[in-house]
Structures are given as structure tokens and as C-alpha cells.
Amino acid sequence: MSHITRIRTQMVEQEYLTKALDDLGYTYEVERGDQVRVELPGFLRRRVHFSKRGDAYELVGDFWGMGNKPQEMLKQLTPRYAYHATMAKLSEQGFTLASEEREPNGRVRLLLRRVG
């Protein structure tokens, strides 16, 4: 049985999406410039994709029988996306990373410096 589901995200930049996927060890392919196809480990031949719709990406796939796998994936992916987006924006403003600490609860503390 097939149940195609679309989950809208707040992710808007492909570059940060693919960096977040790299961080989490997902295998993916960028297709047609605005679509990112992702292999899901542990599910034989199961793929989902992120597709740009309007100004943000949607997670699209047949999640039948997968339980809460899409929500788990987004729960891990969203903070990594935010990390890369934040670092890029701060770099544009002249900040450099002095130190980074990861707390047991998953929170990331950044110490940044800007010269000038």
C-alpha cells in the first residue's frame, strides 16, 4: 500500500540541507537542481526526497509502515541545518569560530570573534 506524504519544512537553502545530510551520514543525490533524493538506512530500497515548493523544501515520500521515521529524521536534520545556516550568516558578517561545545542535551554553544 502506498501513502505519499508531504511534510513542509522551514529549510530554504539546498547547500545547508546537503551539509546537514552529510553530518548525519545520509546518502543522497541532488537531482534537477531543486530536488534532493535521500536513501533511508534500515529500510530496504526506501527513498524519500526533499523537493523545493515555493520558498521552502518539503520532505516527500511513501512512509507507510515506517512509524515516525520522517519526524525522527527531521528532528535530527533541522538543528544541523540551522547550525550551517547560522555559521554561514555569521561568517558573512565577519565572525570567525573561536570554539564550539556540544552539551549532553544536544545544544551547541559557539564562541565567535569578529576583528575590526
Image (cartoon, rainbow, N blue to C red):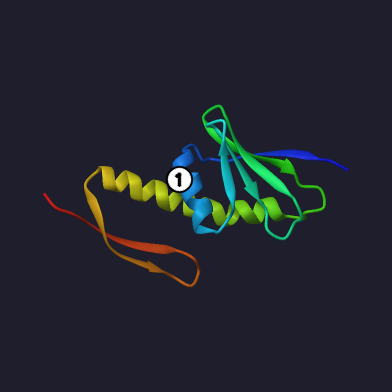
Q: Residues within 10 Å of mark 1 (few under 14, many from 20)?
A: many
When the figure is inspected, residue 20 is found, relative to residue 31, above or below; the finding is: below
What's the residue at 59%, 52% (across, down)? 27
When the figure is inspected, residue 5 is found, relative to residue 69, above or below; the finding is: above
In the figure, is residue 115 to the left or right of 40?
A: left
Mark 1: which secondary structure? helix
What's the residue at 14%, 52% (across, down)? 115
In the figure, is residue 80 to the left or right of 67?
A: left
Q: Amino acid at mark 1?
A: Tyr
Q: Which residue is mark 1?
A: 16
Query: Looking at the image, which is closer to me, 35 or 64?
Result: 35
Toward the right, the furthest residue is 1
Percent across and percent down for residue 66 are 77, 54
Asked if one can make out residue 79 in the rendered structure from this viewpoint, the answer is: no
What's the residue at 37%, 48% (across, down)? 86
What's the residue at 50%, 54% (across, down)? 22
Percent across and percent down for residue 56 are 54, 34
Q: Quadrant of the N terminus?
A: top right
